[in-house]
Structures are given as structure tokens and as C-alpha cells.
């Protein structure tokens, strides 16, 4: 059942409790559970309770002085430092993936607020915890890495890290994608 939960989470990006609920209500059939999840979204509303004021305050503490609707690379570095995450770690990539970052090393207000809402995190402690849970579900095969690495992050050549470096990120098992 654990493998089914992980596959459901990989397919839908839902949280584990939602995956468990959906799979159990669909006789542990992955195809039926995924169909049900997408055809009845209200039934599986996974918006974990977050205080939007706390999320906004968190965003504001890292936002750019020049563009108040973006967290620039300096702000992202401060955020990662406060989260105690190495900027070149898998967890940093997972954060960008879960917030659906459109630009490497930056988060828009919408990406940050929506992403933290999806993760159910309105504090650094909650975000750190959710990222730890999510990092354990990172795809472990090269095919999955190619599928799950955000397309927005695979065109990095002109912005920083060459995209080939993304494929060398270690998975939680210590092997490379």
C-alpha cells in the first residue's frame, strides 16, 4: 500500500493523507483513485489550514526591495538559510518544484502563496516539515526525474546552473537520477 500511496502522490502532487483517503475509498485501485481525485476535487479538498496573513508576512520578510511581488535570489538564499537548507541540495530543488517556480532562484508572490497553501505551511517550521516529507517521495528513476523535474527548471543554461546538473541530483536513496 505504501508504494500505491507514493505513486498516487507522484501523479497528483496531493498530500499523503489525501492519497490514503482517496485510495481507500477506491478499493486501492490507483487508476480509479486518480480518476476520482480529478473528477471530484471538492471531495478531496486538501487545502490544509493555513493562515494567509502568516503566509503573506512570510513572503514580505523575503521579498525584493525593487519588486515587492517577487522574492529575488538574495531573498531565496535567506529563506533557504532560515529553513536550514543547502541551496544546492535536493530539498532546495523540491521547494522550487512544489512552489512551481517559473524562474530559477526566484518566487513570485502567487507562486509562494499558492505553493505554501498547497503544502499546508504558514511558518518556517511547517514548511521545513512538509519539505522533509515531500523530499522522501522524489522520483528515484531517470524516467521519473525527466517527468517530474519542472520543465521551467530544465532550461537553466542561460540563467545559471546548466540543466545537466539537475540530472545528477542524488535521490533520497543515494543514487543519481
Image: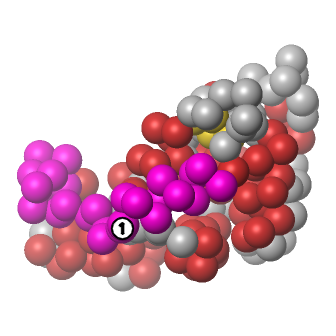
Residue 66 horizontal side relative to residue 23, left or right: right
Residue with the most extreme front position: 65
Quarter of the image where one finds residue 20: bottom left
Residue occupying image coordinates x 45% and y 74%: 3
Whether residue 55 is situated above or below residue 128 in the rendered picture: above
- Between residue 64 and residue 89, name the one nearer to us: 64
Q: Residue at x 61, y 72 (%)?
A: 124
Residue for point 28% across, 62% down? 47
In this view of the protein, which residue sits in the foreground, 119 or 151?
119
Can residue 7 be seen in the rendering of this structure? Answer: no
Residue stretch in magenta: 35-61
Q: Is residue 53 magenta?
A: yes
Q: Mark 1 Cα within 10 Å, few/some/many (few <14, many 20+)?
A: some
Outermost residue on the top side: it is 158
Place of residue 15 in the rendered image (x, y in percent of width and height, measured from the top left):
38, 68
Determine whether, in the image, residue 9 is placed left or right of residue 69. Answer: left
Residue 135 appears in the rendering = yes
Disc 1 secondary structure class:
loop
Q: Position of residue 30 (x, y in %)?
A: 27, 62
Q: Position of residue 50 (x, y in %)?
A: 36, 67
Relative to 65, say whether 18 is above or below.
below
What colouring style does the render use?
secondary structure
Quadrant including the N terminus? bottom left
**Viewer-nearest residue: 119 or 64:** 64
45 magenta-colored: yes
On screen, residue 137 above or below 93: below
Residue occupying the point 46% across, 38% down: 110
Q: Position of residue 26 (x, y in %)?
A: 13, 69
Residue underneath mark 1: 50
Amino acid at each position: 500500500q505504501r508504494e500505491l500511496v507514493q505513486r498516487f502522490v507522484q501523479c497528483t502532487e496531493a498530500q499523503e493523507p489525501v492519497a490514503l483517503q482517496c485510495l481507500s475509498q477506491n478499493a486501492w485501485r490507483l487508476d480509479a483513485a486518480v480518476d476520482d481525485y480529478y473528477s471530484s476535487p471538492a471531495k478531496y479538498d486538501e487545502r490544509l489550514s493555513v493562515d494567509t496573513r502568516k503566509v503573506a508576512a512570510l513572503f514580505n520578510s523575503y521579498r525584493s526591495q525593487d519588486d515587492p511581488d517577487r522574492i529575488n535570489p538574495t531573498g531565496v538564499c535567506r529563506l533557504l538559510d532560515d529553513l536550514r537548507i543547502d541551496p544546492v541540495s535536493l530539498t532546495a530543488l523540491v521547494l522550487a518544484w512544489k512552489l512551481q517556480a517559473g524562474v530559477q532562484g526566484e518566487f513570485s508572490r502567487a507562486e509562494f502563496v499558492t505553493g505554501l497553501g498547497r503544502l499546508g505551511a504558514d511558518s518556517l517550521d511547517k514548511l521545513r516539515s512538509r519539505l522533509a516529507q515531500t523530499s522522501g517521495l522524489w522520483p528515484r528513476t531517470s524516467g521519473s526525474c525527466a517527468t517530474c523535474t519542472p520543465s521551467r527548471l530544465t532550461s537553466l543554461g542561460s540563467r545559471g546552473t546548466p540543466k545537466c546538473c539537475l540530472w545528477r541530483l542524488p535521490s533520497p536513496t543515494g543514487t543519481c537520477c
